[in-house]
Amino acid sequence: MQDTGKYKIQGKNMDKLKELLDKYINEKLKKAVISNARKKDGISKLQVRPILLKGELVYQVTRTEGQKELHENFDKENVVAYLIRQMEENFKQLQLETREVSASALVSKKGKVTIKVKENKGKAKEEYVPMLSHNRTKNYLLKEGVPVPWLVDLGVMSQDGKVKNARYDKFKQLNRFLEFIEDVLPKLPKDREVQIIDFGCGKSYLTFAMYYYLKELKGYDIRVTGLDLKEDVIKTCSKLAEKYGYTKLRFLQGDIASYEGADKVDMVVTLHACDTATDYALAKAVKWGASVILSVPCCQHELNRQVSNEALQPVLEYGILKERFAALLTDGLRAQMLQSKGYDTQILEFIDMEHTPKNLLIRAVKNENKKNDIQQQGKWEACAKAFHAEPTLQKLLFEK
């Protein structure tokens, strides 16, 4: 049965909880987590950390509601009052860590507060260095608080550089994608113009991010082409590129499968190209001898229609399981085929599953020393055959 009443923390119990928070909510706080919600709906978790905002110490409270994370800043007096109220009304457990101690508070149904404090020793004490910068900007390649014109025009940032709450997932996605690019920078030439194509660019958040990061921040000589089927999207993105003076960023309307506008490309990007459109993009990348391929596939319908296996049939008769298995099989075979064509391949998590189920990225880097591995090719061909799968990429790359 769901517990819905207040805890009624009173008297000495209230004093104990307030004393704990007053003592340890300070600049030495590493984090505080309030959890074990009493209600299924509403706030499921709270996290608190100290940050410096315009030189002033404040406490950022991140509250989790469903799949959203909302942020609010308090001074010490108000954050202590807020946490006590939340413990009274919504939560049973509080844990906090500082440089010196780890502490917890548990509240019973009768309002009794049980507090435990343990001193940190050895490495636990030595390794922690207080992080007082605004934690959401730490390590991001695109910095919050620094206005970027295209992020403002695309609705991700406000004019003063603050990331809008409703677009924060997109901001994190862009930064995550740029991290993948940063990892492969040594594979891109610095002594000549780098050719990059973004197949299925859509509204071109990532296209602009690539151009801005590589050209403006890293100083690469690049030429980027964004390709998409939607005429209105291409017109909008072209106007924006012209507005920002991005002279080597162009947008074209067209289909991935029929695109013949290049003879040599250094990096091919494809984000959420639907079904076999990903296969055509990967095949063109291999044909061009692209040094880097970054692909986030989507809607792997092709093998979902084909896949069958007698041993797995009891599992595959469930539609949702068959769909997920077919998607994993599709991307696993794609990665193996790229390996057979001389690439070092990885399948990585793009963003958290809570944001989208389409969260796997295939990263392939050309290895000039890798020769065709017939044995490796035979293994993935046997795997495809075992599930009666005939992927489009196999036909494009391996069938004459």
Image (spheres, helix red, strand yellow):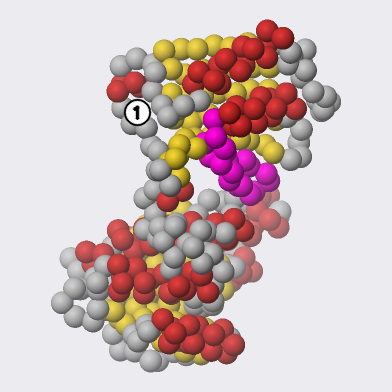
The spot of residue 325 in percent (x, y) is 58, 56
Toward the top, the furthest residue is 12
The spot of residue 132 in percent (x, y) is 40, 38
The spot of residue 109 in percent (x, y) is 77, 16
Tell me: 233 left or right of 335. Answer: right
Label 1's element?
loop
Residue at 46% over, 79% down: 199
Quick check: can you spot residue 215?
A: yes
Quadrant of the rendered image containing residue 236: bottom right
Q: Which residue is mark 1?
A: 128
Quadrant of the rendered image containing residue 22: top right
Q: Is residue 283 above or below residue 142?
A: below
Query: Residue 59 or 111: which is nearer the viewer?
Result: 59
Name the amino acid type tagged 1.
Answer: Tyr
Query: Residue 10 or 399: which is nearer the viewer?
Result: 10
Residue at 54% over, 64% down: 158
Residue at 22% over, 64% down: 186
**Main secondary structure found in the magenta portion:** strand
Residue 66 part of the magenta segment: yes
Q: Quadrant of the N terminus?
A: top right
Q: Is residue 352 above or below residue 34?
A: below
Residue 270 part of the magenta segment: no
Quick check: can you spot residue 371?
A: no
Q: Which residues are magenta?
A: 59-76
Q: Is residue 238 above or below residue 81?
A: below
